[in-house]
Image (cartoon, rainbow, N blue to C red):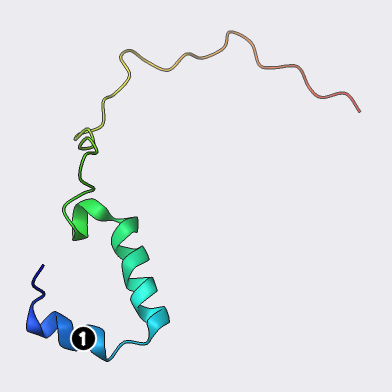
Amino acid sequence: MKIDPSIRAQLARLEPNQVGVLAWSLLAQPQMNAGGIPGQPDPDTPQPTEPGVPTVPDEPPPAPVA
């Protein structure tokens, strides 16, 4: 796999821990930075919504007893 020379230069000046941080940051947001993880389904966009209105109880819950 070929690496862009500008990326290679940036990696060369990073300390080992910084390379690990870079890798973890790419894993944290794969869709934005790396195009996703191979073999994994794409996220639902937009997220599905639940039909209807929220259920509201008829009466408030009982007060806690000490």
Residue pictured at 75% horizontal, 17% vertical: 62
Residue furthest front as drawn: 1
**Residue 16 screen position, x and y as percent:** 39, 82
Camera-side residue: 13 or 48? 13
Q: Which quarter of the figure has residue 24?
A: bottom left
Residue furthest top as drawn: 58
Q: Quick check: 33 left or right of 53?
A: left
**Residue 34 screen position, x and y as percent:** 19, 58
Residue pictured at 27% horizontal, 91% vertical: 13
Q: Which quarter of the figure has residue 11?
A: bottom left
Camera-side residue: 45 or 34? 34
Residue pictured at 29% horizontal, 24% vertical: 49
50 above or below 12? above
Looking at the rendered image, the quarter that the N terminus falls into is bottom left
Q: Which quarter of the figure has residue 59?
A: top right
Under mark 1, the amino acid is Gln
Residue pictured at 26% horizontal, 25% vertical: 48
Q: Residues within 10 Å of mark 1 (few under 14, many from 20)?
A: few
6 above or below 3? below
Q: What secondary structure is found at the residue carrying circle 1?
A: helix
Looking at the rendered image, the quarter that the C terminus falls into is top right
Camera-side residue: 28 or 55? 28
Tally the numbered discs: 1
**Residue 19 screen position, x and y as percent:** 34, 77
**Residue 47 screen position, x and y as percent:** 26, 31
Q: Quick check: 20 left or right of 64?
A: left
Q: Which residue is mark 1?
A: 10
63 above or below 32? above
Residue furthest right as drawn: 66
Camera-side residue: 43 or 24? 24
